[in-house]
Amino acid sequence: MPKTPSLIDVARRAKVNISTVSRVLNGTGKIGEETRARVLKVMRETGYKPNRVARRLRTTGGTSHLLGLIIPNIQNIFFADLARGVEDVAYSNNFAVLLCNYDEDEARERFYLDVMQSESVDGIILPPIHEHDPAVMQVVKSGVPVVCVDRSLAVGNLDKVEVDNHRGALEAVNHIIAQGHKRIGLIGGPADSSTGRERLRGYKDAHAAAGLSVKAELMRFGDYKQGSGQVLANELLSLSDPPTALFVCNGLMTAGALEAIASRGLKIPKQVAIVGFDEMPLASVFNPPLTVVRQPAYEVGKCAAELLLKRIEAPNRPATSLRLVPDLMVRKSC
């Protein structure tokens, strides 16, 4: 049985964005005649039949009772817990959630934003790749309600829910220093993300408060993925004068750093201490149990969904910015 063609299939064959196909269907926006003709030709050739319910919603201003959630890495327990918070609030309010994973890739993020707009979601929750993310800014300008989570967007009057990353990093590094460590390696996040910058600031401020200098050779910056954590930890541990402790700025990179430590046969915390940013599955039963900064991920998702529903109900209300407090879970790794 042949596959029923979708809006995405039409867009790909016509070599246009999904939103362009939607505008052709709805007769909205400025579309060149050549582009319109090409899209209609592909529709005829493929036998594409538009979703009548979705078209009615788009043209009558109805609601789809569908929320979009785009996350950068479904393997990251922080975003899995965040998604659960979003879904619980959505379900209790008779909304469904369309979940997409963009894997820290701008092209994939752009594609999924396009899909969500074509599916007439009532609003979108996401952490933008960086503060000047053009795809997200375009969605905001289009009037679709957006709530940013975890990371900021350089746009005013936008709802957002974040964790106090500076405070979490400051408390973590203060704890490391209190254990007597002076050479503390940093495995940080991307410099163009608000989370990466705030955690770096906490690391530096803790050093300054203790009268310690920040050494460039002890700082490395990854992409929030496990592989980079392993590579960067190996770089730090290979120094002629390696750090005696590591502060790793997210859960997946912490897992990578633990792999690097294990591969070298080093004992935690006797030979190298480690503190991670993000709770990890089974962290409390590791040998030794892992000291981490626990982010209230479920609460972030819950608050974001509540803000989005309020925004859908009252599009012109003032923006709300929430900053939740993380907890330092002191165990045995430092």
Image (cartoon, rainbow, N blue to C red):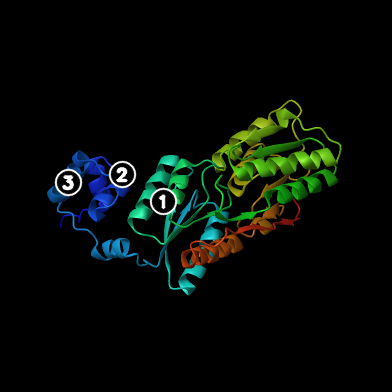
Q: Residue furthest top?
A: 240
Which sits earlier in the primary sequence, circle 2 or circle 1? 2
* Between 129 and 16, the one nearer to me in the picture: 16
Residue at image mark 1: 142
Mark 2 falls on what kind of element? loop
Amino acid of disc 2: Asn
Q: Decide if residue 257 is on the left or right side of residue 98.
A: right
Asked if the residue at tag 1 contacts the one at tag 2, i.e. Cβ–Cβ closer than 8 Å, the answer is: no
Q: Position of residue 24 (x, y in %)?
A: 24, 50
Q: Position of residue 18 (x, y in %)?
A: 30, 48
Residue at image mark 2: 17
> What distance separates the C-alpha of mark 3 from that of mark 1?
26 Å
Residue at image mark 3: 42
Mark 3 falls on what kind of element? helix
Residue drawn where x is 58% and y is 52% of the image: 150
Q: Quadrant of the N terminus?
A: bottom left
